[in-house]
Image (cartoon, rainbow, N blue to C red):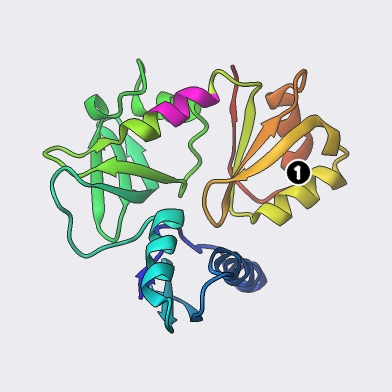
Amino acid sequence: MVVLATKCYVGGAARERALDSLRSLVADDLGDLDVDVDVGLRDDDFPSVTVTGPDATAARNLLRERWGEITPHFETGDTYVGTLESWDEDGFVLDAGEEVRIPSDELGLGPGAPSQVRTRFGLVQHVPLRFVWDDPPRLADAQRDRLFDWTRGTGRLNVNSATRSEVRATLNRAGHAEDVVTVERLGLLEQSVVCAEGTDPPGLLASVGEYLKSELLCVVP
């Protein structure tokens, strides 16, 4: 079994749609492997994927690489994935199966209070982030590099509480299909809308915000 490092925190019909989406994504990930798959959900909202069959070991490794894994133990110097649960003047708090605090000095994302850093990089709540387990834990270099790359592009609109297909449908409904390059999947319910050249991220937020019951944050180059 692999516990994926992404959360399904919505309720009702949205929860069922999200789980259906996850089952499809996992099936696509493992499409070439000879395995049987069962997707469940733990009480803490992390999905568990049970894999059996001749290619089970390869399938589990692929899922760990694709999604990150929630594990019961951390090894110093190793990289893990946690979801952004909260932030305060002292840093970020990630949920990696247990609470992991990243002190502000270990974020490595430039000046400002953690709340300002979060807003500047468009880090919506629950977004998965890679960190290195140490004393104290720190954001992984690859994670920092990826976030800095966001600020050098054409701008982004980051969204939570919605699947990729739901975000794409919302963009189409609001008449913005041609204003975006793509919608990148950050987690099961966290997406990053990559703006086309000339698209204003705050303007896009104002236009689509009424259609989404989500947190939306812009990344402005």
Residues shaded magenta:
145-150
Image quarter of residue 46: bottom left
Label 1 amino acid? Glu
The residue lying toward the viewer, choosing from 84 and 57, is 57
Q: Residues within 10 Å of mark 1 (few under 14, many from 20)?
A: few
Query: Residue 70: x, y in percent?
Result: 32, 61
Q: Say if 114 sits above or below 190 in the image.
A: above
Image quarter of residue 86: top left
Q: Say if 219 sits above or below 127 in the image.
A: above
Q: Residue at x 69, y 26 (%)?
A: 201
Q: Is residue 123 magenta?
A: no
The residue lying toward the viewer, choosing from 119 and 80, is 80
Left or right of 3 on screen, residue 167: right
Query: Residue 141: x, y in percent?
Result: 32, 31
Judge whether residue 44 can be spotted in this image. no
Judge whether residue 169 can be spotted in this image. yes
Q: Secondary structure at mark 1?
A: helix
Instruction: Determine which residue is flagged by label 1.
Output: 210
Q: Say if 28 sits above or below 182 in the image.
A: below
Q: Is residue 147 magenta?
A: yes
Left or right of 148 on screen, residue 94: left
Q: Quick one: quadrant of the N terminus?
A: bottom left
